[in-house]
Amino acid sequence: MRIGLRLALITGLVLGAAGTAPADVWDVQTDNDNTTATENELVHGSDQLHDLGALPGPAPDQDWFRLSQKSYSSYEAVADATSGDIGATLNLDRIASDGTTVLQPSVAIGVGYSRSLRWANTTATAVNDEYVRVTSGSCTTNCGSDDVYRIHFSETTYAVPRFNNSGTQITVLLLQNPASYTINGNVYLWDAAGTLIAPSPFSLTARQLMVLNTATVAPGAGGTLTIAHDGRYGDLAGKTVALEPATGFSFDSPMVPRLH
């Protein structure tokens, strides 16, 4: 009798715990993430779990995020691990400094329940006054704390540590798009002191290879490369090959993403 009662109590506690989602801590604080006054900032490697449970009123929940965009760099925000009530209708948008204008909506990835938002800052100055906003397009005032998603944020800029076009040596960049969609971007050539020499735009269709003779962009110069683009994190592959015709030697430098 006592054993049966204990088992029933334990089962009830387990089921009760399984049916209760943890509170979204960014919603319940005084300085919350429900408006552009948010203090929740996305940085490279951010990985946060949120819900879209309705606010008192009831009112739809909106999750707002701040971010800093470096010059000549690219970024991706991904919302995934969505629960069933919001999975196909999640809105992930980049919002202007006015808190209203949608600069860019996200696109579906996978089978459509996850969203990806990708862009590049092609200017010479950092951008620190834009936002990422997440809302639900289906459950709004009737969303619960079990209507959850996870948001990830990455800087997607690639780096190549060396190119050299001085003397008789020339450097060729091999840039491949192994993905199933077109990726656009810019190759930025920098001197050894970190001063921008020139950009070189590109557009790669699915599985296309680009061969760029960097001597046509930066003749007689040497330094480093960065690649900013609108592809997903890790969706490009490449390297530079420095050729020395006099000796027949070649020197490879890998293109690497920023690691998490």
Image: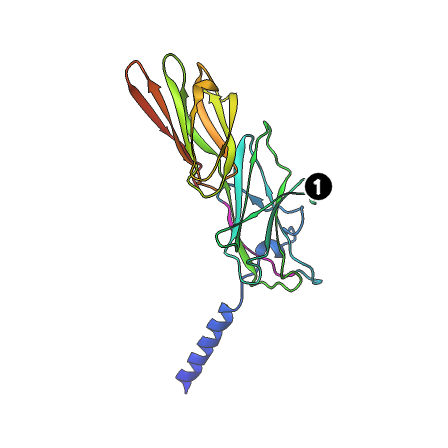
Q: In this image, 175 relative to 201: left or right?
A: left
For image coordinates 70% across by 41% down, the residue present is 98
Residue at which label 1 appears: 98
Tell which of 101 and 207 is nearer to you.
Answer: 207
Q: Image quadrant of residue 147? A: bottom right
Position of 250 relative to 110 (above/below): above
* Boundaries of the magenta span: 46-54
Total numbered labels: 1
Q: In the rendering, at what x and y percent does residue 149 appear?
A: 54, 56
Q: Please tell me whether residue 47 belongs to the stretch shown in magenta.
A: yes
Q: x, y percentage for residue 161?
A: 41, 27
Tell me how the rendering is colored.
rainbow
Q: With respect to residue 23, does 1 lie above or below? A: below
Q: Secondary structure at mark 1?
A: loop
Residue 105 forms part of the magenta stretch:
no
Q: Which residue does the image show at 53% across and 64% down from the upper left?
A: 21
Q: Give the position of the C terminus as an image quadrant.
A: top left
Amino acid type at circle 1 is Asp
Say few, some or many: other residues with alpha carbon within 10 Å of mark 1 (under 14 / 14 to 19 / 20 or more): few
Asked if residue 244 is positioned above or below residue 25 in the image, the reply reads above
137 or 156: nearer the viewer: 137
Compared with residue 34, is residue 140 higher up or lower down, i.e. above or below?
below
